Image: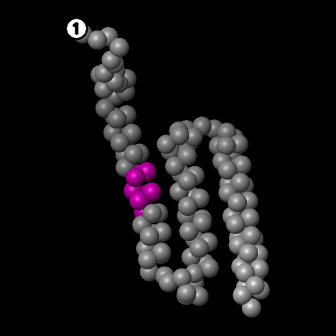
Amino acid sequence: MLRDDIIEYSLDAHHSEEKGVELRKTIWKVTFLLTAITAVEVALGSMIKQSSDYWQIIKWIFIVLTIVKAGYIVLSFMHLGDERKGLKYVILLPYFVFAAYLIFILLNEGTAIFGALSEVAN
């Protein structure tokens, strides 16, 4: 018995081969960019020791690269990159403000807890 509820989506494509080539180029570009950012993060994390003088800068680089990667994922995989600039700002700006707020709270409370624990230890 032939089922009529199964749709073969590959046969239902409504774009030309040129459009398909363009879409595949975009997918490869996104893949290489996200892989490059991740490779930079891994390389920095594996080469720089936490006890070095540069570790504070490396932590901020990690934070910035992670936020850039998250924003690019939202722009490409959620198709936000195809929208108008105003809609991008309305969606991404609160996200970045919230991420900055969380980072501020994390760093502020972390130093407060570290200070309290060091006073107890002495």
Residue 90 visible to the viewer: yes
From the top left corner, tell me how far across and down residue 59 is, in percent: 59, 73
For the residue pair 20 and 50, the one nearer the viewer reads as: 50
Q: Is residue 73 left or right of residue 39?
A: right
Majority secondary structure of the magenta segment? helix
Q: Amino acid at mark 1?
A: Met
Residue 85 visible somewhere in the drawing: no
- Residue furthest to the top: 1
Left or right: where 56 falls relative to 38: right
Residue 51 screen position, x and y as percent: 55, 87
Q: Residue at x 49, y 82 (%)?
A: 48
In the current view of this chain or complex, which residue is farthest to the bottom?
A: 122
Residue at mark 1: 1
Quarter of the image with the N terminus in it: top left
Residue count near mark 1 (Cα–Cα under 10 Å), binned few <14, some 14–19, many ≥20: few
Rendered residue at 71%/54% (across/down) = 98
Which percent across, then down, holds residue 94?
71, 49
Any magenta on residue 111? no
**Is 51 or 92 nearer to us in this picture?**
51
Question: Which image quadrant: the C terminus?
Answer: bottom right
**Left or right: 13 in relation to 112:** left
Q: In the visual, does 64 lie left or right of 29?
A: right
Q: Residue at x 45, y 63 (%)?
A: 38
Q: Which residues are magenta?
A: 29-36
